[in-house]
Amino acid sequence: MKNFVLALATITTALVAGLFYAFAVSVNVAFAQLPDAAYITATQAINVAIVNPAFLVCFLGAPVLLPLATWLSARPVFTRRSWYLLAGTVVFVVGSFGVTIIANIPLNDKLAAFQVNGASAEQLHSMRVAFATPWNNWHTVRTLAGIMALALLVMACLQRDTKSESRKA
């Protein structure tokens, strides 16, 4: 059971970290080339499209599965695997999930309320700058946190389960 939960926690974390990474190295790069109105419209569309079951299962699953995997690993005592899991859990929950909830989603909500039609060039540019600069900064934080969390989870997966190893001896 605990290895299955660890595998699910690692997979969901990897998918979220991979999505954030892919967005950073492709979508953000492409969007930087767009004029303000197109950038805002495209970003608004992505912010709606991303809220779907495939994304939500991973995005909400990882912060549930990670503490569960840590708890299962730590029973009855903490092992090296448990420490890697605990570190990965904290990094992901705070740095990826938490940053998304506290920083990126509120910025997405502000952008969603902005009406592109009828906005002046100055209003479009101001909105883009007010959104894109902090959003991209926070996106970098959550991307790096996701990658670090995934690396810690891989380290946990590579650790021998000392409790079961000692039972075999």
Image (cartoon, helix red, strand yellow):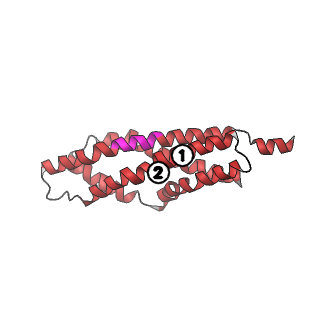
For image coordinates 47% across by 56% down, the residue present is 55
- Depth-wise, is mark 1 or mark 2 nearer the camera? 1
Q: 161 left or right of 39?
A: right
**Quarter of the picture holding the N terminus:** bottom right
Q: Quadrant of residue 152?
A: top right
Q: Is residue 138 magenta?
A: yes
Q: Quadrant of residue 84?
A: top right
For this orientation, the residue located farthest to the right is: 169
At which x and y percent is residue 126?
Answer: 18, 47
Relative vertical location of residue 140 with respect to residue 76 in this rendering, above or below: above
At which x and y percent is residue 113?
Answer: 25, 60
Circle 2 residue: 97
Asked whether 132 or 19 is in front, the reply is: 132
Asked whether 4 or 164 is in front, the reply is: 164
Kindly identify the amino acid type of the residue bearing the numbered disc 2. Phe
| SS category of the residue bearing label 2 | helix
Query: How would you rate the neighbour count of disc 2 (Cα within 10 Å): few for under 14, some for 14-19, many for 20 or more?
Result: many
Relative vertical location of residue 147 with respect to residue 13 in this rendering, above or below: above
At which x and y percent is residue 95?
Answer: 46, 45
Q: Which badge, 1 or 2, is on the more N-terminal residue? A: 1
Total label count? 2
Circle 1 residue: 90
For image coordinates 33% across by 39% down, the residue present is 29
**Quarter of the picture holding the C terminus:** top right
- Give how far apart the Cα atoms at labels 1 and 2 are: 10 Å
For image coordinates 66% across by 44% down, the residue present is 82
Asked whether 7 or 166 is in front, the reply is: 166
Q: 147 left or right of 126?
A: right
Kindly identify the amino acid type of the residue bearing the numbered disc 1. Val
Q: Which residues are magenta?
A: 136-144
